[in-house]
Image (cartoon, rainbow, N blue to C red):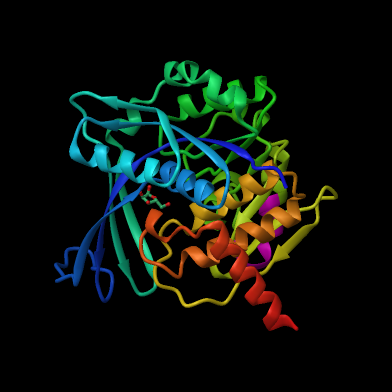
Amino acid sequence: MNKAKLVVIGSLNMDIVVETDRFPQLGETLLGERVRFIPGGKGANQAVAGARLGAETAMIGAVGDDAFGEELLLSLSGNGVDVSGVKRVAGTATGIASIYVAEGDNSIVVVPGANYRMTPDDIDRNEDKLGEADIVLLQLEIPVDTVVYAARKAKSLGKTVVLNPAPAQPLPKEIFGYVDYMTPNRTELARYSGMDAEGDALEAAMRRMKEMSAAHIITTLGADGSAYLTDEGVMRHIPGYKVQVVDTTGAGDCYNAGLALSVGSGRNLEEAIRFASLVSALAVTKFGAQAGMPTREEALEFAAQQARHKT
Ligand code: RIB
């Protein structure tokens, strides 16, 4: 299989992760158990996952001129990501995500900082990187106008475009014409389709989203795996893996990177989804977003283990 060339355009955040027994209630003060500072941001997480899983990966994004920015760049480059497309914005703070991890889940508040200084000019300045890519992977933690511009440019250069529409944001219709693969989770699907997406309502919501877009729609369902619509418009469910959950932060990012690099390496959609499920299952078994991303070798070993269990 060819080594996919992946360009990720998106956010870099320092994750301030607080572990507690349970989530605080409104107005309540809790004593947490531990705080950690871990490189994150949906864009940077996807870039690290892509690189660890074997794609030649470049990141286009922005950090502030502070110590967190420095650390985030080191985390990316230490994982083999080309960071020459990440600008440093003077006088601006690097993006921060305040994360509570409790009860096997997380809740996150992001303060975008430098991420919101990403403009269409930054995309133009990195046109050569886009030109060399097989796949361009986008999310919504930088300004939507810049995401739309990037998707339009990538499409005009003949690239395959994957949009992880997270966190859910109002999107102009135009963007749906540029995207080849769209990967909402259930909550995002409900927001974009304007329909209930719980239980049996999932398929109808996915069909509604498909009517808005030429893209393949793939919905991530956490521990339940994911679902996609076939070319005939029928929903297929691909189950997840049973693993020991340590931290779900970044699992969706790992899924998106796995899907993007698989599609970029020539796998068909169902194979790509199976690979994405496999690697995102591994991501939840370790603590931290970027820290928990599996390597290609770990993914192959896990796949072999699963195959042994089946026989
Ligand atoms: O998807 C997980 C990421 O969302 C975290 O790393 C955090 O930075 C937020 O952007």
- Side (left or right) of 130 relative to 232: left
68 in relation to 243, above or below = above
1 in relation to 58, above or below = below
- Side (left or right) of 250 relative to 149: left
Do we see residue 202 in this rendering? no
The residue drawn where x is 59% and y is 52% is 258
Secondary structure of the magenta portion, mostly?
A: helix
Q: Position of residue 130 (x, y in %)?
A: 57, 25
The residue drawn where x is 58% and y is 47% is 194
The residue drawn where x is 23% and y is 60% is 36
- Side (left or right) of 12 relative to 260: left
Q: Position of residue 133 (x, y in %)?
A: 61, 30
The residue drawn where x is 36% and y is 40% is 12
Q: Nearer the viewer, residue 276 or 211?
A: 276
Magenta stretch: give its range: 198-206
Tell me if residue 202 is in the magenta stretch: yes
- Side (left or right) of 241 relative to 11: right
Q: Position of residue 147 (x, y in %)?
A: 50, 29
Tell me if residue 158 is in the magenta stretch: no
The answer to which quarter of the image holds residue 296 is: bottom right
